[in-house]
Image (cartoon, rainbow, N blue to C red):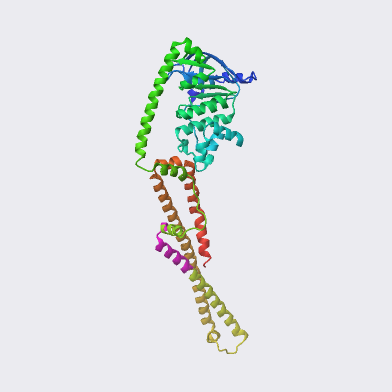
Amino acid sequence: MLKFLLLDESERDNRLKSTVDDESVRIECQLERAYWNQNGTFSLQNILFHARPGDLICIIGPVGSGKSSLLQTLTGEITYFDGKVRLNGSFCYVPQESWIFSSTIKNNILFGKEYDNQLFRRVIHAAALDTDCDQLPDGIQTMVGDQGVMLSGGQKARVNMARALYREADIYLLDDPLSAVDTKVSKYLFERCIRDYLRDKICVLVTHQIQFLQDATKIIMLDNGEMVHTGTYSELLTCSPLFSQMLHNINQQECTNDSKKIQTAATFSRMASSGSTDETEESLLTDHIEMHEKGSVKWHVYLDYIRASSGVFIGIALLLIAFGIREFLSIFATWWLAEWSEDENHRHIQYANCTDTKDKKMNAIKLMNETEWNNHHNRKFYFYCITVFILTILTLLRTITLQSLCLNASRMLHNRMFQRLIRCPIAFFDLNPIGRILNRFTKDIALIDEQLPNTIFDFMHQWE
């Protein structure tokens, strides 16, 4: 940590400070050299170009020639560089690898911005997402899962593109967004998104799609990190044999990639033919939605809880015994206290009225001498105290029994949930966010541990 804090400050923000110097939107790049680290062998060299609103700059070159590094230099990600890079205006960077977070399609496109219905509809139409949203079960509210597992690679790329369009930036830096879609969709995206929707913006496009180069305002050819040629399509085709050779190489590479994609698609098609893929895909789109039961609680839920506590018969028997005996003793103690109070009342009547009565019990109490009455009084008192003591013990045992049954049920249900969770397929964790799974454990188990025992106690107390 100390070594990191003592490193020299990065000055990559210098290239972005110029955005406030001038109100006109433009890109000026006079890059002499740029490299990721001082000990690295690869670097960008001698790249000069400028762009105004309405310009479409296409960057081409073989794999590893530095196309993506050039865009990251414009965004300020490359730490070390010599020269001058100026971006006047807000910019939006679309990476080659689509980034999707676990939420709805709508939230992935908005990305924190306020929802504008008209703008949103224009964006998803330009990104060719309107048809996909109509086919999804919840439309734009469909959950895409962690890292967009519910979406195909082409759909991820189009969501990524729609997010960029919704930002309404001045400058768009597109790192080969057309490579993840097929030929028909790539043509649609280029015509509707890049050439039409972004016609008044500055657009810097890294691409291997040579059929779109004729619409570019300027083409930049990179080879091994160096700009070898720049100009329009017709200029390069006339003056640069290297451009023609590069087009041929890119075309051959694309043909090879297309053949591999066709073979891979055929392989997966044969693998999927053994099962009902349509039903599986539909279930994947719908099963990830969290469901909530409505209406009255089913009887099997109560039985499952009692069975988890100690078994149906044992659990019911223990509850009945614990509450039944305690309630019986409570009634008996009340009755005994009433009898004792009545005897005391009869004894006092003896001194107030000495006439005989037909009540044998009252006459027996009147005929007792003082010693016999004291013994009778003490028996009543001690027996009542013993009854109250036993009642207290039974109340404590009843509470312990109920809490033990609830604790055992909670432990069994938690273990059962955990055992089933660790045996779930990987697709379950892709479709259900980790936060939702943790919420079920924490919230549901908290209800079982804290609220349910009190509810059961109150329910049993109503029958006392």
Q: As drawn, is 320 to the left or to the right of 50?
A: left
Does residue 8 appear in the picture of this structure? no
Q: As drawn, is 366 to the left or to the right of 286?
A: right
Vertical order, 256 against 232 (above or below): below
Dominant secondary structure (helix, strand or loop) of the stretch shown in magenta:
helix
Q: Residue furthest top?
A: 239
Nearest the viewer among 420 and 352 is 420
Vertical order, 40 against 421 (above or below): above
- Judge whether residue 143 is colored magenta: no
Vertical order, 20 against 271 (above or below): above
* Image x and y of residue 257, in percent: 39, 25
- Judge whether residue 321 is colored magenta: yes
* Image x and y of residue 194, in percent: 54, 25
* Image x and y of residue 98, in percent: 48, 30
Nearest the viewer among 367 and 362 is 362
Nearest the viewer among 370 and 237 is 237
* Image x and y of residue 223, in percent: 44, 15
Q: How many numbered dots are placed on residues in this image? A: 0
Q: As drawn, is 272 to the left or to the right of 71?
A: left
Does residue 67 appear in the picture of this structure? yes
Q: Which residues are magenta?
A: 308-326
Q: Residue furthest right?
A: 23
Residue at position x 45%, y 45% in the image = 287
Residue 276 lies in quadrant? top left
